Image (spheres, rainbow, N blue to C red):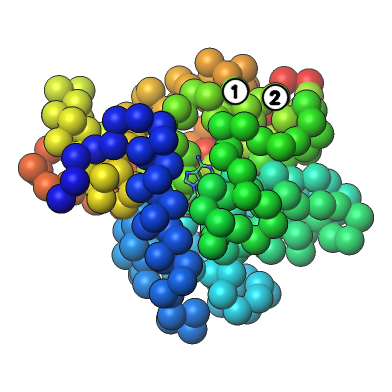
Amino acid sequence: MSQTPQSKEAIHSAVTSIYGAVAQTRNLTKPEATCCGSDKLSLADYSPDEIASVPLGAYLGEGSGNPVRYAALAPGENVADLGAGAGMDSFLAANQVGPTGHVYGFDLTREMVSFEQADIEHLPLADASADAAISNCVINLTPDKRAVYREIFRVLRPGGRLAVADIVLRGVPEAVEAFRESGTAETWCACVSGALTENDYLAAIREAGFADVQVVAERPGQLQPGGEVHSVAITITARKPA
Ligand SMILES: C[S@@+](CC[C@H](N)C(=O)[O-])C[C@H]1O[C@@H](n2cnc3c(N)ncnc32)[C@H](O)[C@@H]1O
């Protein structure tokens, strides 16, 4: 096992290597999750109708929730999907915003890109250009979560909404710190050892300027090796003040 990558470049390299392989080897008719819990948990997030409504291959079972369900999208809206992967949530969002709206899907991994390759710490979108931002099991993989939330705040219009599914850690602070420090490139890319504690994660969203930060859904926690820390998939909504 390799050590936890220390630099931003090393984290990006580990992420693109693992998710590039996922995109190229995944069985499109029977996706199996490599992170964020089991296939069963991922499948429970989407209805059969939702899965049938997207192109074959868009659903890879790599999410930690269903943020589109909580994004309250309306026809004509512009939506940014951060870490779009193969496009599952982008396509669901596109069905809701319709032909007069637009969904911009961004991903670091070239093979995973449905729409545009980009690092979500630097979104290629103008200030205040999006009505809503969604993201599913991605921000825990980034080196600087606070920078990502500042960037989302920048691209949302005043009153714009955020709906994010992601992984957070629960446990006593010392145990969480020890768990994070014992991480490897593999556990980072499996969406666990790069995750923040729930308190730190919610604080990062508030510090970026968001209001009404709420946890609206949660999967059962997964006990991590060592027996003291749970990783939990939560879905959060928030609003940029008008
Ligand atoms: C667990 S997958 C989730 C994909 C998708 N959201 C879904 O639900 O199927 C994580 C994705 O985040 C992307 N990713 C990780 N760090 C990123 C970054 N800094 N910028 C853009 N995409 C990133 C990876 O390339 C990968 O496609």
Q: Which mark is residue 126?
A: none
Residue shown at 54% from the left, 60% from the top: 112
> For the view shown, which residue lies furthest in the right direction?
100
Q: Look at the image and tell me whether residue 66 can be seen.
A: no
Q: Name the residue under label 2.
A: 154
* Horizontal and vertical percent position of residue 89: 62, 58
Residue that mark 1 sits on? 150
Kind of residue at disc 1: Arg
Q: Residue at x 81, y 52 (%)?
A: 102
Asked if the beta carbon under badge 2 is closer than 8 A to the nearest atom of ligand 1, the reply is no
Locate residue 164, reporting x and y percent: 54, 42
Percent across and percent down for residue 151 are: 63, 27
For the point 65% across and 76% down, the residue is 55
Splitting the image into 4 quarters, where does residue 194 fall? top left
Q: Is residue 33 left or right of residue 179?
A: right
Q: In which quarter of the image is residue 210?
A: top right
Q: Do tag 2 and tag 1 residues touch (Cβ < 8 Å)?
A: yes
Q: Is disc 1's CB within 8 Å of ligand 1? A: no
Which three-letter amino acid code belongs to the residue tagged 2? Arg
Q: How many marks?
A: 2
Where disc 2 sits, the SS reads helix
Within 10 Å of the Cα at label 1, are there few (<14), some (14-19), or many (20+) other Cα atoms?
A: some
In percent of the image, x 43 and y 74: which residue is there?
26
